[in-house]
Image (cartoon, rainbow, N blue to C red):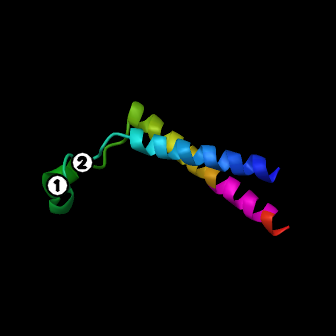
Amino acid sequence: MYNLLLAGLMIDSVLIIIAVLMQPAKQDDAMSALGGGSTDLFSQQKARGFEAFMQKVTVILGVIFFVLALALTYLSSH
């Protein structure tokens, strides 16, 4: 059981990395992040389409990661 959960955690870790790398960039350059400006007005728009899908996938994979990590901790202590 422990090895199965550990393999699941490793697979989930790789999937989280892929999901994060596939998300579109929020800002064009580093200066706009530091300077702020008029781009802040439109930064609160709701995600749509592929961006919304990738956000949901990332959240789900994060929850799975957390649950697997807690289960592995419980199994290793007993």
Q: The residue under label 2 is which amino acid type? A: Gln
Residue 26 appears left or right of 9: left
Q: Is residue 9 magenta?
A: no
Q: Are marks 1 and 2 in contact (CB under 8 Å)?
A: yes
Among the 4 quarters of the image, the one containing residue 69: bottom right
Identify which residue is drawn at 43% across, 37% down: 52
Q: Quadrant of the C terminus?
A: bottom right
Q: Position of residue 49 (x, y in %)?
A: 40, 30
Residue topped by disc 1? 32
Residue numbers of the magenta segment: 66-75
Disc 1 residue crowd, few under 14, some 14–19, many 20+, Cα 10 Å: few
Q: Which numbered disc covers residue 46? A: none
Among the 4 quarters of the image, the one containing residue 20: top left
Q: Main secondary structure of the magenta part?
A: helix
**15 to 63, vertically: above or below:** above
Taking depth in this image into account, of 21 and 49 the one nearest to the observer is 21
Identify which residue is drawn at 20% across, 46% down: 28
Q: Position of residue 67 (x, y in %)?
A: 68, 54
- Lower sequence index among marks 1 and 2: 2
Q: Secondary structure at mark 1?
A: helix
